[in-house]
Amino acid sequence: MIELRYFAWLRERIGTGHETVETKAATVAELIDELKARDEGYAFAFSDLKAIRAAVDQALVDLDAPIAGAREVAFFPPMTGG
């Protein structure tokens, strides 16, 4: 089981800030593909992968990063400085 966290407009499009899922995905990208297949809210939220950042166990990663053994995967839009 992996805890998923969604931030900003991803949370709004999906309709929740967090959930726990069971997955067969090996990478963040494969996890996203599984989520997109769930329903159109997920498909819409993950429609532009260039606008998505991910963290595995609170470490920023690329979408091809492995998730084996991960406890948490977080998704959020790119951060801006100020």
Image: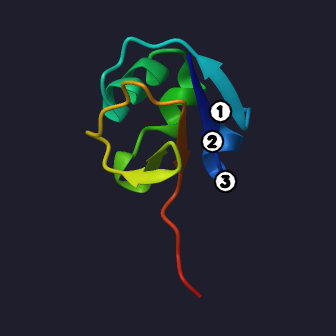
| Nearer-N-terminus badge (1/3) | 3
Q: Is 72 drawn above or below residue 30 in the view shown?
A: below
Looking at the image, which residue sits at the far bottom? 82
Which amino acid does the dot numbered 1 rest on?
A: Ile
Callout 3 environment at 10 Å: few (<14), some (14 to 19), or many (20+)? few
In the image shown, does 10 or 5 lie closer to the viewer?
A: 5
Q: Is residue 78 left or right of residue 64?
A: right
Contact? badges 1 and 2 (CB < 8 Å): yes
Q: Identify the residue at image location x=53%, y=50%.
A: 58
Whole-Å distance between the Cαs marked 2 and 3? 7 Å
Q: Position of residue 4 (x, y in %)?
A: 59, 32
Whole-Å distance between the Cαs marked 1 and 2? 8 Å
Q: Position of residue 51 (x, y in %)?
A: 42, 55
| Nearer-N-terminus badge (1/2) | 2
Q: Identify the residue at image location x=32%, y=42%.
A: 63
| Quadrant that contains the C terminus | bottom right
Q: Position of residue 50 (x, y in %)?
A: 35, 53
Quarter occupied by residue 32: top left
Say which mark, if any, is on residue 47.
none
Whole-Å distance between the Cαs marked 1 and 3? 10 Å
Q: Is residue 3 left or right of residue 66?
A: right
Q: Is residue 41 left or right of residue 65?
A: right
Question: Residue under circle 2?
Answer: 6
Question: Residue under circle 3?
Answer: 8
Quarter occupied by residue 37: top left
Say which mark, if any, is on residue 14.
1
Which amino acid does the dot numbered 2 rest on?
A: Tyr
Contact? badges 1 and 3 (CB < 8 Å): no
Which amino acid does the dot numbered 3 rest on?
A: Ala
